[in-house]
């Protein structure tokens, strides 16, 4: 059988490990990042510098983990169901913003929603990263 590619338009449901409402949880629609966007996010998160003046100096490495996580969630979460607004105590209707990278438009979560879900950004970012990895059964197909 031929290789089956990854569908970058597909999403899967994800419920936070700490969601208190097991009967009616908040559901995050986790999507796949296109390869160029993923590379941009991951490359911008790290920097490596070697001193050309003194080869004995140690290399400097920096990693912007929080920015990486923020961007992964902002671009990788494609929908949210049953997120409760802390002010109104009612479900939030998530309206996405559009940003252009190069000549391509991307839908992203707005800053207000990112603020509401800030305690769970690291967990959601790891789920976004998992999405572009084929499972064992997918590899076999």
Image (cartoon, grey):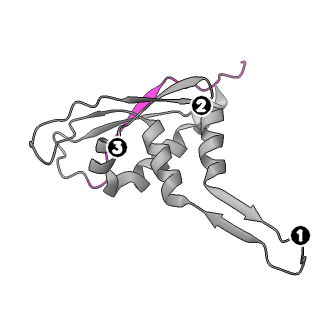
In the image, residue 99 sits, relative to residue 122, either above or below, namely above
- Queried whether the magenta region covers residue 127, the answer comes back as no
Distance (Cα) linking label 2 and label 3:
22 Å
What residue sits right under mark 3 in the picture? 111
What residue sits right under mark 2 in the picture? 34
The dot on residue 52 is 1
SS majority, magenta: loop
Give the side of residue 96 with respect to residue 99, left or right: left
Mark 1 or mark 3: name the one nearer the start of the chain: 1
- Boundaries of the magenta span: 1-18
In percent of width and height, residue 28 lies at 34, 38
Picture quadrant of residue 25: top left
SS under mark 3: helix
Mark 2 or mark 3: name the one nearer the start of the chain: 2
Q: Residue furthest bottom?
A: 56
| Crowding at mark 2 (Cα within 10 Å: few <14, some 14-19, many 20+) | some
Give the side of residue 59 with respect to residue 55, left or right: left
In percent of width and height, residue 54 lies at 89, 78
Residue in the image at 59% along x and 31% along y: 34
């Amino acid at each position: 059988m031929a290789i089956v590619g990854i569908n970058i338009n597909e999403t899967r449901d994800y419920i936070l490990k700490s969601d208190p409402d097991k009967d009616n949880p908040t559901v995050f629609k986790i999507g796949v990042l296109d390869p160029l966007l993923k590379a941009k996010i991951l490359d911008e998160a790290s920097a490596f510098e070697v001193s050309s003046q003194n080869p004995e100096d140690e290399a400097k490495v920096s990693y912007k983990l929080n920015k990486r996580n923020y961007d992964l969630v902002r671009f990788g979460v494609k929908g949210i169901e049953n997120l409760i607004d802390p002010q109104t105590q009612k479900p939030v209707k998530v309206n996405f913003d559009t940003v252009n990278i190069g000549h391509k438009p991307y839908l992203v979560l707005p800053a207000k929603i990112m603020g509401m879900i800030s305690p769970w950004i690291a967990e959601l970012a790891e789920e976004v990263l998992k999405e572009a990895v084929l499972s064992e059964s997918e590899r076999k197909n």
